[in-house]
Image (cartoon, grey):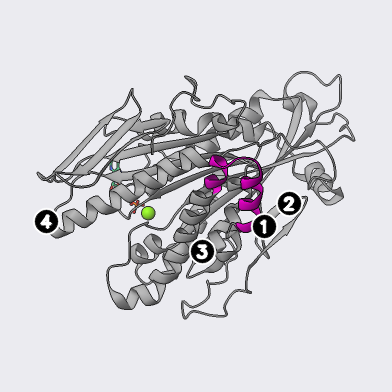
Amino acid sequence: SRGRADTHAADGTAATKDGKGNVIVSVRVRPNVVRDAAQESEWDINGKRALVGYKGREGGDYYYDNVFDAQDNNARVYDAAAKRLVRRVMEGYHGTVFAYGMTGTGKTFSMQGTATNPGVIPLAITDIFSYIRETPHREFLLRVSYLEIYNEKIHDLLAGAPPVGNGQGAPQEEIKLREDSKRGVYATPLKEEIVQSPTQLLRVIARGDNARRVAGTQFNARSSRSHAVVQIVVESRERAPGGTGTLKDNKRSAIVPGGVRVSTLSLIDLAGSEKAADSKERRTEGSHINKSLLTLGTVIARLSSDKDKSGSEKDKASKDKHLPYRDSKLTRLLQPALSGNSLVSILCTIQIGSSGSAAAAHAHTGETLNTLKFASRAKNNIVSHAKKADESFGNGGDAGSRALLDRYRLEIQ
Ligand code: ADP
Ligand code: MG
């Protein structure tokens, strides 16, 4: 199936009538390591097209909002795939960015990056604080949480206590997913840290990364099998009218007793999408990964079969159809994003060519094709009708939150 490239504008996020512009699907091709002679691949950046195949065998030819190749650094990826979404989160929309792809293709590289080539998370943090600095008529409160889904269990990476099952100390209290009309789907009990500077925010996330590292005896194995979810909750409200000048000047100005706007930016580094290699693993860890990622695939595939049906047939179909969000922790957590409540950017990472035997190369091509198909279905099927959060106390901006804003409101120096 072929995606449509026409719903997207030069800045990559034009909102269109059908909500398609609120969903960006990109493919990033990791620089080649070894090229496989039997493999055909081709990507056309301007045409936003990626073709991967195996000579004489099944292939795919798909269109996306962006196709990035080896020449595109993280800043370029961020600008095209996430920058506008982050800005809109600051304006009151929910936004979700997630990286999908097999292990080793560059999910973590894209989300975290390196000191010289920072990824989506640090670039988003820079933009969040720039926005706050440029918006002196509002004041902001930022809270961050960091969780990991591993073997269908949620671990709080900021809790201090070691995650369940690592053999060290008392395990954490079990974290559950809940839903209410104000907050949507949320994990509880989950530690949220209030942060007041980019450095502080980066430090909290680094602490979570560290907890993740400590929890896994084999970090790489665990990181490729778990989903890492950073959530930044942004609350803001208008400052007192008449308050002009810099935030510093405004420090003592009266606070308008007005509404608080609450929105969430979710930044997700998914587990590797490949099938588990050995059978023992497939039965234990692998089966859980597959559960979350398979359910994600199922939900995305089913989101759309609706679209092709019309009238009573559609009504019947939607009655019959149960979108299995509750079948896995990941889809439950992503439900608001997938069901149209959030702006979404999906970054699918692939690597063309692989070393090793012909069989290994073939399997690799199969996985690559699966990623491209996933991306293509996501592009065709996810529709977002995200709305700006109301400025009301009811929308998470309750009395407690107002008190927090009074106490911790950001004063950018
Ligand atoms: P994943 O998180 O998908 O398992 P990683 O992000 O850890 O993969 O990437 C695997 C390796 O490839 C890392 O050493 C990373 O630095 C490197 N890498 C991935 N993508 C790129 C890229 N676009 N440019 C340069 N190096 C990359
Ligand atoms: Mg990784």
**Camera-side residue: 27 or 135?**
27
Of labels 3 and 2, earlier in sequence is: 3
Observer-side mark, 3 or 4, equals 4
User: Dividing the image into 4 quarters, which one contains the C terminus?
Assistant: top right
Circle 3 — which element? strand
Q: Quadrant of residue 20?
A: top right
Q: Is residue 162 visible?
A: yes
Say if the magenta span includes residue 309.
yes
Residue identifier under label 4: 358
* Main secondary structure along the magenta-highlighted residues: helix
**Residue located at (64% from left, 52% from top):** 316
Q: Is residue 113 visible?
A: no
Residue identifier under label 3: 149
**Residue located at (50% from left, 49% from top):** 300
Numbered range of the magenta stretch: 303-322
Residue identifier under label 2: 183
Circle 1 — which element? strand
Picture coordinates of residue 314, whole percent (x, y): 62, 46
Left or right: 26, with 299 as reference point: left
Picture coordinates of residue 168, whole percent (x, y): 49, 79
Of labels 3 and 1, earlier in sequence is: 3
Q: Which mark is residue 186?
A: 1
The answer to the question of whether label 2 and label 1 lie on touching residues, with beta carbons closer than 8 A, is yes
User: Dividing the image into 4 quarters, which one contains the N terminus?
Assistant: top left
